Image (cartoon, rainbow, N blue to C red):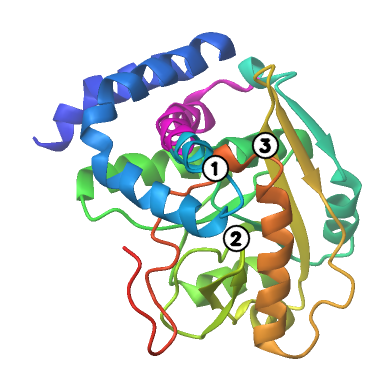
Amino acid sequence: MRCLLLTPVIALAKGVARLPQSMLLALGRALAWLAWPLLGSRRRIARINTDLCFPALAPGERRRLADASVANTVVGALELLRAWHAPASSLDGLARIEGLGHLREALARGQGVLLMCGHFTHTELAVRLLSQALGRPVRVVVRRHNNACLERWFDQARAAVFGPTIGKKDVRGLLRALSAGEPVVYSADQNFTYQNAFVPFFGVPASTLTATPALVQRANAVLLPFWYRREADGRYAIRIEPTWPGWPAGDPAQDAARYMQELETVVREAPDQYLWAHRRFKTRPPGEAPVY
């Protein structure tokens, strides 16, 4: 019965997903304005993060950046609905994609591809647009929701466009997908408390997963950087790059640092589209005080 209460919500979500891009973005900005008083904790985290990561900016500029990121997170919720529920025809012309040949070549060799990205506010829409251009589903690694009804909706919606989802801690599932020659989108830029090392991210020690090279090697897969941003005209610039030269280097901490370095470069292209509301620096090196 409780799950049935979601039926009108899902119907509304499907309607939102079909809105013209300009209307969807405008609606997202309006919802962010309406929800602003409820987003206090997220705004606080984002402001701490931007204070840490952009010390050269004036305080007012850092605050505007943090607030813009939180607003983009609300917009990103609608972009998520578009990723799940928009008909393919409504996505035509919404993306400019570079480097698709790198992905096609690896898949043609029968290799799985770990598409390494970061937590931006429109990640799953970028994956949907990539899947459409590629002509096959691109798998996603997700965090399961604790609410069973919501998880059923989320998982069914994702599976319809990306194929079966892979849980964040389902290492075997990830290895099976890669070993079977599938493309999988993956990010390791959130706070980790296991298999981790403290490496610089915007000059701040960030607890970062070090297991990525081992996953790629165990599956005989290839890592390809996968980056994207929403441009001023509302379209999405997506690019797939070759594997970083010299990666992996054989030192897990060094490889994690390289990932953070490359991600930082991309974040600087559109810093307000990064998920600064996440407590990226929650785990601190020994002896350092909490920042949140």
Left of 34 or right of it: where is 133?
right
Specify the label residue 186 is tagged with: 2
Give neighbour class at mark 1: few <14, some 14-19, many 20+ (Cα, 10 Å). Answer: few
Where on the picture, by quarter, is residue 202? bottom right
Please indicate whether residue 54 sits to the left or right of residue 142 in the image. Answer: right
Residue under numbered circle 1: 58
| Residue count near mark 3 (Cα–Cα under 10 Å), binned few <14, some 14–19, many ≥20 | many
Secondary structure mostly taken by the magenta-highlighted segment of the chain = helix
In the rendered structure, find residue 229 and report the number of the disc placed on it: 3
Can residue 277 be seen in the rendering of this structure? no
The earlier-in-sequence mark between 2 and 3 is: 2
- Left or right placement of residue 56 versus residue 239 in this view: left
Label 3 sits on what residue type? Arg
Q: Which residues are magenta?
A: 67-88
Q: Residue at x 73, y 82 (%)?
A: 217
Q: Residue furthest front?
A: 58
